[in-house]
Image (spheres, rainbow, N blue to C red):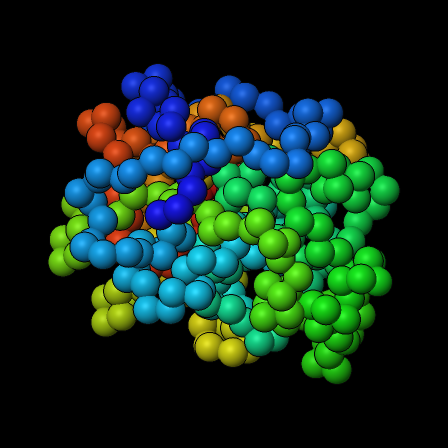
Amino acid sequence: MRRWSAGVLVAATLVAACGGSGSSSGSSTSSTGSASTTEVTVPETVPVTTVIATTTSEPPGPVYPLTGLPVTDQAAAERPALVVKIDNNSAARPQSGLNEADIVFEEIVEVQTRFAAVFQSKGSEPVGPIRSGRTQDITLLGSLYRPLFLWSGGNANVTRAIENSDFVNLSAQRSTVYNGAGFFRSSEHSAPHDLYASSAGAWSLAPADAAPPPQQFTYLPAGTAAVGEPSTGVNLEMDGLPIEWRFDAATGLYLRSNGGTPHNDALSGQVSTANLLVMFVDYQPSAADANSPEAQTIGSGEVWVFTGGVLVKGTWSRADRLSAIVLTGADGNAIMLTPGRTFVELPRVDSATAV
């Protein structure tokens, strides 16, 4: 591991401080922090501190920071995180790249949801459909250390916020980016759900001082099974979009459906993940657009972690936008994930049922 966000160094303090309480129905405590867009301007260079990881939760040898899996491609391990905003309108399905991303965040937007897919160990050719960003992305993704941000562009207020952040702005509205990132319109979908790009092209636009992201989660040692309450999955409701995740014991993966219909990726079949985090958050109106909901991802709240066929309930916490998400179990210990891809759902409180 080459660089860690300074926020990671506060993780131990957060574990001691967080103590969200859950309701009998499984709803989350509300965030105790705010992600006001009036505070999104950050220095061009985010201060980082180099540390040596001593945790025994990692397998021997170097691992990819966003999956915990052993490195098989050193060049990939050294590149920066690439965040792609992927459309989730029904007219945008099937998307391309959801199963190639190391981490996928699903956020509520004005109409149901949108994905922030984070690539590092693998790319996707092509990736999309690509849509606009939101101010909530700046807060949610700050711990990735100056990620490349591939998006279709946005209104003046959101664009200004992105430009003032530490993200590398790869907007399709910038002529210097459009051809370099390989943007194109696909005949498979109708506008505005037809914009695609190349992850390889996007990485070619990384600045000379770009660096890989710090590790975001802690992982179980190789060959170790997760311990928790047996569970086959979860049902979610994301502002009118019904989502079901079910554990497939044969593959060790969770499979996604929408309203009973399998959610497929055009490149690789049904959307799946090794780890599923249901991170309950509050939503407040964005200062950039009052009609746009903004997930409050600084503070703490309840989290349900599904991994290896079990459910572990606990607390998520973050001190600031540069801090990785800290997952703490009811026993006060860190919740460890299975090495592999992770999908993070950001539902409102009281909107999920474990099965």
Q: In the drawing, does residue 196 fall left or right of residue 244? A: right
Q: In the drawing, does residue 151 fall left or right of residue 256? A: right
Vertical placement of 103 versus 23: above or below? below
The image shows residue 338 at horizontal and vertical percentages of 26, 54
Question: Residue at the spot x=78%, y=66% of the render?
Answer: 178
Between 133 and 148, the one lying in front of the other is 148
Residue placed farthest to the bottom in the image?
187
Question: Residue at the spot x=64%, y=39% of the render?
Answer: 166
Give the quadrant of residue 141. top right
Between 195 and 354, the one lying in front of the other is 195
The image shows residue 212 at horizontal and vertical percentages of 47, 51
Q: In the drawing, does residue 49 fall left or right of residue 192? A: left
Question: Residue at the spot x=39%, y=36% of the render?
Answer: 50
Question: Residue at the spot x=54%, y=71% of the render?
Answer: 124
Give the quadrant of residue 102. bottom left
Vertical placement of 24 versus 203: above or below? above
Give the quadrant of residue 255. bottom left
The image shows residue 90 at horizontal and vertical percentages of 65, 65
The number of callouts visible is 0
The image shows residue 70 at horizontal and vertical percentages of 28, 61
Between 139 and 5, the one lying in front of the other is 5
Q: In the drawing, does residue 46 fall left or right of residue 16? A: right
Vertical placement of 342 versus 155: above or below? below
Residue placed farthest to the front in the image?
208
* Residue 107 visible in the current orientation: yes
